[in-house]
Image (cartoon, rainbow, N blue to C red):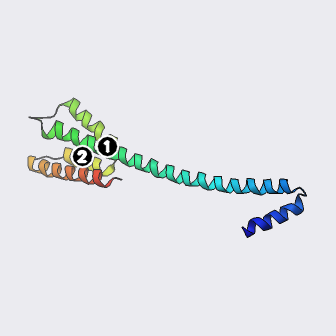
Amino acid sequence: MIIIYFLYKSMHTIFSNKIVSALIIFLAIVNVVLWSAYSSRGAELQRVQDVIANIEYGRNILAFQKLFVDKVLKSNGEVDYDTRRELEQAVGKTNDDIVISAWNAFLSTKTESEGQMKVKELLSVLAERAYHGK
């Protein structure tokens, strides 16, 4: 309040009209208040955008995990080309290097026992990434 009083007194010496001085001080205070509200809304907006991006990331991970379980683990035999392409697109949609490398490790297996081990690793990575997010 003391600052406002001294500001008012100095403005009164510049502008002889008290109404103009009071109006300038009022507009300056309003400007500061509005700027503060604007900056806090900007920070809140950024937090909300980060939460939405994390939700979308988790959805992509879980969509790939569900597709993998439905199309690979529940299949009776080999996976056809269209299903493999669908899986490739789903893993690419995750946009996660760790998930993609676990997927590629699974694809490069030579034996059934190695494939079973890589499936466990892939499912573990998917669960971890879906739970913790980016």
Circle 2 SS class: helix
Residue 28 is situated, as x and y percent measured from the top left of the image, at 73, 56
- Left or right relative to 25: residue 48: left
Report the disc number at residue 50: none
Q: Which residue is mark 1?
A: 59
Circle 1 SS class: helix
The residue at the point 75 percent across, 55 percent down is 26
Give the camera-side residue of 82 and 31: 31
* Mark 2 burial class by Cα count in 10 Å: few <14, some 14-19, many 20+: many
The residue at the point 26 percent across, 54 percent down is 128
Q: Quadrant of residue 81?
A: top left
The image shows residue 127, relative to residue 88, as above or below, that is below
Q: Amino acid at mark 1?
A: Arg
**Disc 2 versus disc 1: distance between alpha carbons?**
17 Å
Report the disc number at residue 103: 2
Image depth: mark 2 or mark 1 in front: 1
* Mark 1 burial class by Cα count in 10 Å: few <14, some 14-19, many 20+: some
- Left or right relative to 9: residue 79: left
The image shows residue 74, relative to residue 38, as above or below, that is above
The image shows residue 14, relative to residue 64, as above or below, that is below
